[in-house]
Image (spheres, coloured by chain):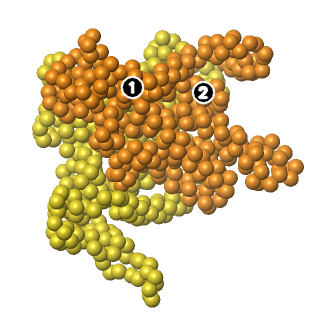
Chain colours: A yellow, B orange
Amino acid sequence: MQQYIFRRLLQSVLIVFVLSIVVFLLLRVAPGANPALVMCGINCPEERLHALEEEMGLNGPRLPVSVGSGAPFVEFHKHSQYGDWMTSLFDGSFGRDWNGNSVGDELKRRLPVTFELMIITTLLTIAIGVPFGIISAVMRNSPADYGVRFTSVLALAVPNFWLGTLVLLLPQDWWGYAPPITRAVSFFDSPWDNLRQYVPPAAVLAAVSAAGIMRLTRSSMLEVMRQDYIRTARSKGLRERLIIGRHALKNSLIPVATVLGLQVAALFGGAVIVEQIFNLPGLGIYTLGALIRKQYQVAQTLTLYIGVIVVLLNLGVDVLYAWLDPRIRYS
Amino acid sequence: MAIEAASVVLGEVELRTSNIGGGRRTWMLIRQNPLGFFGLLVVLMLAFVAVFGRMIAPLDPHDVSTTFQTGPSLEHLFGTDHLGRDVFSRVLYGARISLTVGFLSVIFGTLVGTAIGVFSGYLGGSIDNLIQRTVDTAIAFPALLLLLILAAVLGPSMRTIIIAVGIAIIPGVARVVRGAVLSERNNQYVEAARALGASTTRILVFHITPNIVALSIVIMTTLLGTAILAEAALAFLGLGIPNSITWGQDVNDARSTFPFHFWQAFFPGAAITLTVLGFNLLGDSLRDIFDPRLRGRL
């Protein structure tokens, strides 16, 4: 097991390294991707553009190693765009965007917003998805089961940006109510205002992910109920509530737990959308803005962090899986 | 439970092998999959709208007027938007881009994904391991973020959106196909072919691939909804196809133009939902008919 984790950690480092290079190069080979041009605006005079390029460090070599056709064939550069980026990641500043704002400072401000959004979403997802999934499985083929399944099929087809837009527009249109669109309010300063800000967007995200969890819980529960040990429990004369609550639930929630772990990463995509709709100053909107405005320092740093989180979550989920389910042990 | 399952299997076999007439057979398939049939109807209707929508549309979707943001009426079935354009006509026009991007990106993604999956599953060993770790990471990586990066990098156009959405679905396809190849590889008919002296290329092309094709088609149908959602989300975030009428863009207009009006957002979004629902239901039914073992994996 330890050896397995060690090997996976090594692989993870490799994946993150490859990811950093891929993202770095991808953002730079793009057509019309010159950030200096975006910075300078339309009708940019030639000299100003060159000055900006120099200032933004766009003229230096991209990678620390370059392959030339000339004599030394392989050249090493002490300063390169990639090398400088990597150094900036570890010196605490996390790099600066083209306007000179520290990415680290922004992260400090924005991380709590997205983090709270994800926590509330995950809690809502579990609170809605798991109980209804169980009900649906236990009362199989009842009207309740059909209701749950119908709702989940429908919810999986609803685009989250549409749901979010409607959640924002409907109360506004009909009752003149809008969630407070001010700066993000800290939960500890004013819990009520904070929740008024965060619960609607989180509920929008949870509606879709809960549908997935509902389906998964149902099928996993049905699978477990078919097992021999459940029949044994039944033939021992145990009460149905005990069989479901103690015997079936534990095993059927194993895949649910692992999928929930993976969904946390996927939630980030949803965060981009609901932060945009509900005007929450979080990481998602920051990433979107960075990509649109060609703020590559920011975009590549954020992508790399998300990549690290994803890789660690993946590893964590696999380990969790082996730990929860003794039948699965890695050799 | 076991008897129930057995009778279902027997019914399935009977349905496939018996010589009952075509009409009755179709009717039985419909009765067994009412939701799938509903999905099929929705998809056919959409295809019709995508092809002939421009002729049905009562008004030019670009025509501005002074009747801003009205609710549904006889004159404007779905109301008008912030520029006084007819939302019904815009929804009809929007079907074309949605379906085109959906189909082309899914075909592209499934072809590449299937190739990678077959390659990876067949080769095995360290290359397989490497590909699978990459696939793991790509699947766990937030799909929308991947799309945003690709769309921002490739620049906005129909072709690039198709490529971006296609790339985003490759990892999922590769994983499912690889799993199928692994299980096909150990089947007895493959063993028999090998015992008869068939080369590995022959086994791959004539024995394994035909079994993967059916799977790929099922995957394609189930992924169409996902691809359409992805295109709509990109359009909503302003990274869609410029100078075109898309449902996602119209929902965004409703959100970002003052005064906000509920109806303006409702219909384009409802169109997306209906489309995705149709493809999902059809895909689920096809999956259940062709390969019930895939339930839960797709």
Report the chain holding disc 1: B
Quadrant of the snapshot with the N terminus of chain A? bottom right
What's under tag 1, amino acid-wise? Arg
Q: CA distance from mark 2 to mark 1?
A: 31 Å
Percent across and percent down for residue B39 are 51, 21
Report the chain holding disc 2: B
Percent across and percent down for residue B96 are 42, 31
Quadrant of the snapshot with the C terminus of chain A? bottom right
Judged left or right of residue B41, residue B257 is: left
Report the residue at 14% width, 27% height from top.
B259
* Rendered image: mark on residue B54: 1
Residue B177, image quadrant: top right
Residue indicated by mark 2: B286
Res. A311 in view: yes
Residue B186, image quadrant: top right
What's under tag 2, amino acid-wise? Leu
Nearest the viewer among A36 and B255 is: A36
Nearest the viewer among B209 and B133 is: B209
